Image (cartoon, rainbow, N blue to C red):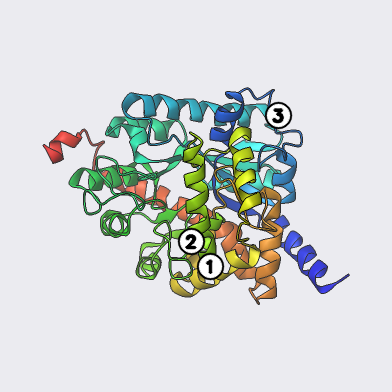
Amino acid sequence: MTAAADRLAEARELLASAPVVDGHNDLPWALREQCGYDLDALDIAGDRSASLHTDLARLRAGGVGAQFWSVFVPGRLAGDHAVSATLEQIDAVDRLIERYGADLAPALTADDMESARKEGRIASLKGAEGGHSINNSLATLRALHALGVRYMTLTHNENNDWADSATDEPRHGGLTAFGREVVREMNRAGMLVDLSHVAATTMRDALDTTAAPVIFSHSSARAVCDHPRNIPDEVLERLPANGGVAMATFVPKFILPAAVEWTARADENMRAHGLHHLATTPDAMAIHRAFEADNPRPIATAATVADHLDHMREAAGIDHIGIGGDYDGTAFTPAGLDDVAGYPNLVAELLTRGWSHADLAKLTWSNAVRVLRDAEAVAREQRTLRGASIATIDTYEG
């Protein structure tokens, strides 16, 4: 065997005992867009590589032991429309878990994650992407938690009524007073505060407010790629005191500086064809591929992601980093990390860079399990100190 093959075999052996907890996978939204949630039409028990980044065989090949399935809805859905679409996403995840019970295990707690690993199943958790999903209602937030949602990303690509997004014009200067109450109620419920997608001001306000560790479910290092979706060093450096975990994403436009400008042009091309720039339907991908044929795309690799993880480890410490690929939520992926089967290639790259097995086990498994366990402990304490908040946005914002 070559040295590279040896490293890959070593990576697979490591993942057998410390599998990947992936912070973000958009399969539910892809199923909504591609087949209207018809699980017979896109049966992930079969090979779905022609249209999806995710199926059961590739999850197994990638050494995935736990997956936060994103119950995302786009910002263009507002009010009760956003809430009902989020419920449909939750239902889709529940039906996936029920249908594929031999491979997917429902998980609500850190103990559930450990139990699933021992059973050889993939722990399946839910994460809501975008605070607009609760329609400014703390009761709705609690209802989502009761339905199994274990993190909420405070914004998506647009500001909402109480938090600023990284990719919108500043409106609030971070979190509003009601936004801080949302964070406190998430702490009380045991729902992780996810700071991917939010403005740096919102990151800082959330860290100033929260009693529980936060996560970044799919964000990389701004010092390595200067994109507003990434995490500034001064925020990464606050994670040890907070106990949180930053999970590096694989999206090329967030990790490879040369891809930022190219993606802006590709997005504009999509809009010129009357499509949303984030669309990944077959028709949308055909337009992307035609654009790429005329405009060669800068290619990220597993080494590109490893560069971010090296930096994030230096800035935040080994106990505060993880992985959040964002598969099925992006049109393009790095070479070698083409789909969910690619995680061993990243681990092999990190082994080549001298990462120890103990450090890699923290990155892939134990950091993410620990952060959920810590949030659960904070929730138990908070419930002894305060009851459920009945505040409304008008209570704070008038």
Q: CA distance from mark 1 to mark 2?
A: 6 Å
Look at the image and tell me in which quarter the C terminus lies. Answer: top left
Image coordinates of residue 69 in percent, x first then y, are 54, 40
Q: Nearer the viewer, residue 299 or 381?
A: 299
Residue 207 makes an appearance in the image = yes
* Residue 326 circle label: none
335 horizontally vs 363: left or right: right
Give the answer, above or below, for where 220 lies relative to 315. Answer: above
Confirm or deny contact between disc 1 and disc 2 (CB under 8 A). yes
At x 61%, y 25%, the residue is: 35
Precedes in sequence: disc 2 or disc 3: 3
At x 52%, y 26%, the residue is: 91
Q: Nearer the viewer, residue 270 or 77?
A: 270
Q: CA distance from mark 3 to mark 1?
A: 34 Å
Based on the displayed image, in which of its 4 quarters is residue 239 positioned? bottom left
Image coordinates of residue 241 in percent, x first then y, are 36, 67
Residue 248 makes an appearance in the image = no
Q: CA distance from mark 2 to mark 3?
A: 32 Å
Task: Spot the residue most to the bottom.
Answer: 354
Identify the residue position indicated by label 3 in the image: 43
205 horizontally vs 330: left or right: left
Precedes in sequence: disc 3 or disc 1: 3
Based on the displayed image, in which of its 4 quarters is residue 233 positioned? bottom left
Task: Give the amino acid type for the residue marked by disc 2 in the picture.
Answer: Ser
Based on the displayed image, in which of its 4 quarters is residue 160 positioned? top left
* Residue 220 circle label: 2
Look at the image and tell me in which quarter the N terminus lies. Answer: bottom right
